[in-house]
Image: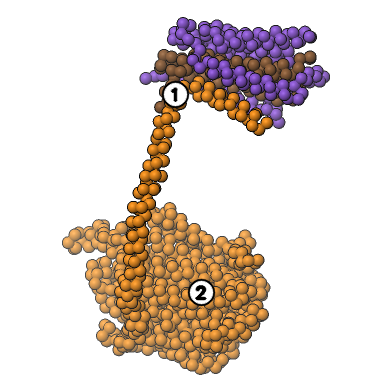
Chain colours: A brown, B orange, C purple
Amino acid sequence: MSIPLSWYLVLAAALFSIGLYGVLVRKNAIAILLGVELMLNAVNINLVAFWRYLDPAQMAGQAFAIIVFAVAAAEVAVGLALIIAVYRRRKTVVADEIDLMKW
Amino acid sequence: MATEILIWLLPLPPLLAFFLIVLFTNKNKALSHSVAVGAAGLSWLGSMIVFVRALGVEEFGKHAFESVINWLPTGETWFQIGVRIDPLGAATLFFVAWTVLMIFIYSIGYHNFGQPAGDHDRKGLPPHGATVTDAHGHPNDPGAGKHTVPSVEPMYSRFFAFIGLFAFGMYTLVVSNNLLTLFVGWEIMGLCSYLLIGFWYGKPSARNAAIKAFMTTRIGDVFMLLGIAFLYSATGTLTFSEIFTEETLHHLATLSTPILGLSGAGLIGLLLFIGTVGKSAQWPLHVWLPDAMEGPTPVSAMIHAATMVSAGVYAVLRMFPLLSLDPATMSIVAFIGAFTALFAATIAVAQNDIKRVLAYSTISQLGYMIAALGIGAYVAAAFHLITHAFFKALLFLGSGSVIHGMEHGVLHTGNHHVDPQDMFNMGGLRKKMPITFWTFLIGGFALSGFPAITAGFWSKDEILADAFAHGHWAVFITLAVAAFLTAFYTMRQITLTFLGEPRTEEAKHAQETPWTMTAPLVVLAFFAVTYGWVGIPEHFPLLGGLIPNWFHEFVGSTLAEHPEAAPFSIWPLLTSLGVALGGLFFGWLAYRNVKSPAEDKLQLPVLKNKWYFDEAYDFLFVKPAYWMAEKFTYLFMDRQVIDGLLHAVARFSLFLGHVFRNYFDKPVVNELIGDGTANLVKSSGKGLRFIQTGRVQYYMLASMVLLVIFAVLYYFLLA
Amino acid sequence: MTGAQIVFLVCAGLILGSAVMVVTARNLMHAAFWLIAALFGVAVLYALLEAGFMAVIQVVIYIGAIAIMFIFADMLTRREVRESRAQIGRNWPLAAFAGLSILTGLVALILGQPGVSRTASAIPAGVDPVAALGTALVSPDAYVLPFEVASVLLLAALVGAVYIAGIVKK
C-alpha cells in the first residue's frame, strides 16, 4: 500500500469542512441532515484509516465505526421524524422559520 | 447463643416494644399489649437462661459472665462499657424478670382490656365506666337492662409503651458492668417514673406527684453524678471489676478529701448513697414515694416496690466494697436505714388509703435493707431485697385487685363519692375476692415475717441475726420495733380490708378480678413463700440444713472475701418470732371491730400528717423557692436588672438599626446594590436580546466562528 | 504513482465533488442523489483500506437505508421548499470562512504530526479483519457492551421516531 496516511486524513478533513458548510448554510432542514451525514462519513474514514495504518490486529477503529453507523441511523430516524412532525404542524421545513425557542 | 451475647440482648426487647408501640401500634390495643408482653416474655426467657447457666458455673463469683466493648475514646485509652452478670446480678435478674413479666400481664386486666370505651372518658383521666345494655342489667332499674361496667383505659397503648421503656431501663441497670450505663438505666427509670406517676395527667394531684417525684429523686441523682465524676477522676475507670481491685480500693481508701475529713472512698460512697436515698425513698428524701401512688397500680407495684426503688438498694450493694472501706460512711448508711425503717413504719400505722400503707411499708422495708448494708450484712440485704420485691409486688398488685373490685362496686351503686381506696370503705372482701384475699394474706404474712413458711421471715431474721451477732444494738432494737409495727399495720390492713363484714354497699358488690390480674398474684405468691427457703441458715433449729443455704454461698461469692454467715443465736430468733406474731395478733385484736376512722385510736395527727415532713419541706424549701422566684428572681432580678439591661440593649439596637437603615441600607444596599444589580441585568438583557434568534443555524455558526477565533488565539498566544 | 494511488485520487475527486454538490444543489432531490455518489466513493475507500465489511455495510446501510430515507422525507415535505426559493442562507460567506478556517487548521495540524506520511504495512498473515471484527463486537472483553448499548439506542430511536412522526389523534 503506497498511499500515505496523510492523504486519507486530509480528504476526511475536507469532507468534514464541506459538510460543516452545508450544515451552516442550507435552509432546508433535510439538507442540514445531509451535511451531518457527510461529517459523520469523514469521521468514519478517519477511524478506518487509523485502524489500517496503526494496528490491523486491533479492531477498535472498525468497531467504533460500526457504532457510528448505528448512531447515524438513529439520528437520521429521529431527525427526519422530527422534521416531518414539524412540517405537519407548521407547513415548513426551513430551519430559520422554526424559531419558537426565542425571546 | 453465647451467654455474653444473650446478656447484651436482654434489655433490647422492651426498648424495641416501646418504639414499635409508639410508632406503629398505638391505635391497636391488642397489638400493643401483645408486643409489650411478648417483649417482656423474651427478656424473661433470656434472663432465665442466663440464670440457669450462671447456676451451672463453678465458683461463679470469680468467673462471672462479662463482655466489654470500646465505647468512647479518651485520649490514648478507651472508655469501655459492657455487661456483667455475677451472682448478685444473676439473683437480681431473676426477680426483675419475674416481677416485670407478671406486672406486664397484670396491666392488661388492670386497664380493663376488652371492655367498651367509656361514656365520657378523656385522655389523662382514669376511666369512669361505660353504660351498656345486656342481660346482666337490673330489670328494676329505670332504664331496663342498662348497667355500668368498667371501661378501657383511653391511653392503653401509651401505658404499655412506657412500662416497656421502663423495663429497658431496669434491665440495662442490672446487666451493666459499670457505673455509667448503670446511671443511664437509672435515669431512664427516673423519666419513666415521672411519666407513669403523671400518667393520669388530667388529675392535678397526679401532676404534682409526678413533679415532686422527679424533683426529689433529682436531688439524689445530682449527688450520685457527682460521686461518679469524682470516682472517675480519682481512678480513671467506672467498671466495677476494675474499681474493686485491691490497689484501686487502697488508693481510694487512703485518698484524703477536704469534706468532713472523709476518705475518698467514704466521700464517693456517701455521694452514691445519696443517689440511693433519693431513688429508694429513704429519709429525708422519702416524701415522693407515697405521693407516687397517684399512678396506676401496676406502676406502683413495678416502680415503687419491685424494680426502681430496688435499683437504689442494688446500686449500694454493687458499691458495697467501696462503701465498706470507710466506717463513717457505713455509720451514716446504717443510721439512715434504721431511722427510715422505724419512722416510715409509724406513719404506715395511721394511713387509711390501702396503697399508701403499702407505700410507707415499702419505705420502711427499704430502710431495712439499707440498715443491713450499713452494718455490713451484705448477703442479708440482698436476700431481703429479693424477697421484698416478690412480696411487695404481690401486695401492690393485690391492692390493685382490691381497688379494682371496689371500683366494680362503685360502678354498681353509682355512688362516685365513695373512695375505692379507703380501707374503711371495705371489709369482708375475703368472700367476694377469694384469690385476691389468699394471695394478699400470703404477701402480708411475708411482709410481717410470719415464721418459717414465708420468705419475709427468713430474710428479716437474717438481718436481725446479723445485727445481733455484730453487736449493733441500736440498729437491732430499732429494726425489731419497726418489725413489730410492720406486722401490726399489715394485720390492720388485712383486717380492715378482708375480714369482718362489708362496711359499705360498694364492698358488698365488689367482684373478683379477671384471670390476667389474679394469675400474676398466684405466681408472685408462690415466690413470696418459696424464695425464703433457699436462704435458711445452716444452724437453724429443726429446719437448718434440710435445704443448703444456697443463697448465702451464691450471692456471698460476689465479694472478694466471702462473708461469714452470722453465728446462730436464739435471741434474735425469739425477737423476730415475738414481734411478728405479736404484731399480727395485736393488729387483729385492735381492728377486728373498728367501723370507722373515728374509732381508730392510732389516728394521731402527727402520724396522719406523716410527721409533718411535707409541711416542713414546704416551709423550708418550697415556700422560700417561691419567694425567691417571686420577689427576688422575678421582681428584682428579672424585672429590674435583666429587663432593664435588655431594654437598654433594645434601645441601643433600635438606634443602631435606625442609623443603619437610613444611612446604609436604603442608599447603599437598596439603591446601589439591590436596584443597581437588577437594572444592570435588565439593561444588559435588553441589549443582548437580539442574539437570541431561536434559529439553530445562527447559534451553530456563532459557535464555529468563536471556535476558529479561539483556536487562532490559542495557537498564537500559547504555542 | 501506483495504481492504488490513482484509484484513491479518483475516489477522492468523486467524494469531494459530490459533497460540494450535496451542499450547493438547489434541488434537494439532486442533493440526495449526490450524497449517494459521495457515500459510494467512501465505500470504495473502505475497500481500498481492506475493510471489506465496512465497504459492504456502507453500501447496504448508508446508501440502501439512510439515503433512501432522505429521499422519502424529501418527497413527503416537497411542496414547500421550491427550487425557486433561495436554498442558501444569507450568512454563507461567514460559514464559508468558518469552514475554510477549520479545514486550514486541520490540514496544518495533520501535516505537522510526525508519522503521517507512513504507508500501511501488510495485514499480518492469519488475521482475518472481518472475523476479528465479528469476534471483537460480541466478545465480553472487547466491545459487547457498547454494541448492546448501540442496539438499545436504535430501539429507542425506533420507538421515538414512530411516536414523534406518528399520526396525532385529536
Pointer 2 residue: B225
Which residue reaches farthest right? C125
Q: Is residue A66 left or right of residue B200?
A: right
Look at the image and tell me in which quarter the N terminus of chain B lies: bottom right
Residue B651 location (% of width, % of height): 33, 63
In the figure, residue A70 lies in which quadrant? Answer: top right
> Label 1 is placed on what type of residue?
Thr
Q: Is disc 1 placed on a helix, strand or loop?
A: loop
**Residue shown at the point (64%, 82%) measured from the top left:** B250
**Of the pair C27 and C133, the residue shown nearer to us:** C27
Which residue reaches farthest left? B142
Q: How many neighbours does mark 1 have within 10 angstroms: few (below 14), some (14-19), or many (20 or more)?
A: some
Pointer 1 residue: B693
**Of the pair B475 and B219, the residue shown nearer to us:** B219
Q: Is residue A53 visible?
A: yes
- Chain letter, disc 1 residue: B
Residue C107 drawn above or below residue B7? above
